[in-house]
Image (tube, rainbow, N blue to C red):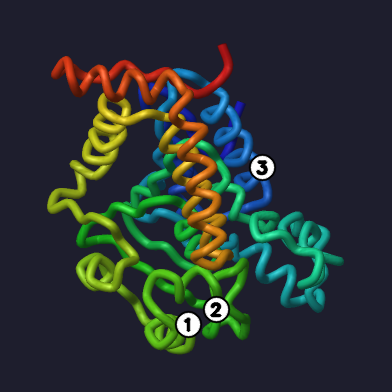
Amino acid sequence: MYETIRYDVDDPVALITLDRPEAMNAWTDRMDREIRDAIAQAEADRAVVGIIITGAGRAFCAGADMNLLSDLSSNGGNSDGGGAALADAEGRTESDAGDFDGRFPYLMMTSKPIIAAINGAVAGMAFPFSLCCDLRIGTANSLFLTAFAQRGLIAEWGLSWLLPQLVGPSVALDLLMSSRRVMGPEARELGLLNHMVDDPDELIPYCRNYITDLAQRCSPTSMAIMKRQVYTNLHRGLGAAEAEATRLMVESFNRPDFAEGVQSFIQKRPPEFGRLGND
């Protein structure tokens, strides 16, 4: 079904692997479409509580495929050889752009947790893609590189908003302007990585265990609502965020998950929450 990714489900985890190792998993229009399709499958699958995205071989994703970049540079920004991502953005203005209508922010509106398992290099457009995932877990071999200034480009696909949210404006400008390499330990210190594992072979098992723990202890409905709260409230003031939280809290009192959460605590047993997805 897929040519540029692999998609595997092992309850409670969906694993999406970018699978162009010979090209360091460089991003193509087909890969973009296939990842979107796999995310939609995972969101609809009740067996899936959380999603892991990683790369095959030594890189997570080296950014846009250089054939596309070469084509764009030689044709004045126009490409017949694959520019769907650019075509989708044509005609959109600041006034009509929704906060989650861009190339990668749909990941933020996906109802299930998404972990980027950073097994190697993250460069170029893969940088904002990884930041739109909910968590990033890596190793000492993880590498973040903006690369845009080295190509005569700008902070693409919302990175000028995403990166300062994590590391602050001054550090963001350092990383954007210098295009310097940030390895795993520094990435963890800056907040680009949430967690770092010592053994690269344990990266995917660690991410699986993280999601399995969520599946055993946490309400998928609660996680979906909280995820939406966090991302939408980044664009609101405190008062609006608290008002919405009050409304959502009252709604949660009437859900089966609330009763189950209380009873499982009282009875000292693991909770049994319903899954999200199609029957």
Give the residue number, with chain letter if any, for mark 1. Answer: 176
At 61% from the left and 81% from the top, the residue drawn is 154
- Lateral position of residue 117 relative to residue 200, left or right: right
Evaluate whether residue 23 shows in this view. no
Q: Nearer the viewer, residue 100 or 131?
A: 100
* N-term mark: 1 or 2: 2
Amino acid type, residue under disc 1 in the picture: Leu
Q: Nearer the viewer, residue 77 or 95?
A: 95
Q: Where is residue 249 in the image (x, y as percent from the top left)?
A: 46, 39
Give the residue number, with chain letter if any, for mark 2. Answer: 148
Residues under labels 2 and 3: Cα distance? Answer: 23 Å
Amino acid type, residue under disc 2 in the picture: Phe
At 61% from the left and 48% from the top, the residue drawn is 106
The answer to the question of whether label 2 and label 3 lie on touching residues, with beta carbons closer than 8 A, is: no
Give above or below for 104 relative to 48: below
Q: Comparing marks 1 and 2, which lies closer to the viewer?
A: 1
Q: Which residue ends up furthest to the top in the rendered image?
A: 279
Q: Which of 107 and 54 is in front in this view?
A: 107
Give above or below for 250 relative to 232: above
Asked which secondary structure carries label 1, the reply is helix
At 39% from the left and 69% from the top, the residue drawn is 166
The answer to the question of whether label 1 and label 2 lie on touching residues, with beta carbons closer than 8 A, is: yes
Q: How crowded is mark 3: few (under 14 residues within 10 Å), some or many (20 or more)?
A: some
The quadrant of the image that shows the C terminus is: top right
Residue 279's label in the rendered image is: none
